[in-house]
Image (tube, grey):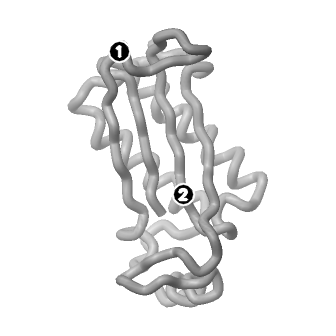
Amino acid sequence: MPITITITKGVIASERHGKVVKEITDSFLEKHGLAGNTVMTPNVTTQLHIQPKNETFSAGEPIEGAWVEIKSPSFALADRKVQQEFFAAVTEIIYKHSDATLPKKHIWTNAVHTVDGSWNMDGIAMTNEELGAAIAKG
């Protein structure tokens, strides 16, 4: 499940970038009851983008911020409680690693659900049912 994290340069010290990625990954797995799942854990991937201060905007104006988007099958992040808990955790993780200097209102999150049958794992495009069966083995 690809996670894309975009942060304005300087919001979080570079030596903390890996910790942010790890904590968000662990939170996603934990909120779905998949912590330690040998199938799912290596398939939660992340791209971290650090943008110069003049390349991040809100309302068309430069801003320091953080954006987190996760792409997942439709059964992930489908439960309202999981959505609330996961995105609250993401916000807290980023806020904490900014040394509480980035206002929470400058941390944006969203999820995109993929088309059933398009989830690729180990070179095989899987349906939600096939993916669920693979995850259950882990």
* Outermost right residue: 80
Kind of residue sitting beneath label 2: Lys
x 43%, y 46%: residue: 4
Instruction: Report crowding for label 2: few under 14, some 14 to 19, many 20 or more residues within 10 A (C-alpha).
Output: some
Helix, strand or loop at label 2? It is strand
* 129 to the left or right of 126: right
Amino acid type of the residue tagged 1 in the rendering: Lys
Q: SS for tag 1? A: helix
Identify the mark nearer the N-term, 1 or 2.
1
Residue nearest the viewer, comparing 128 with 40: 128
Percent x, y of residue 101: 45, 13
Residue furthest out toward the top: 61
Residue 6 x %, y %: 41, 35
Q: Residue furthest front?
A: 60
Residue behind mark 2 = 71
Residue found at x 27% / y 24%? 13
Q: Which residue carries the number 1 mark? A: 53
What's the distance in space between the residues labelled 1 and 2, CA to CA?
26 Å
Q: Where is residue 23 shown, x and y percent of the image?
A: 41, 46
* Residue at x-position 45% and y-position 52%: 3
In the displayed structure, 72 sits above or below 19; it is below
Identify the image quadrant of residue 113.
bottom right
Residue at position x 53%, y 84% in the image: 126
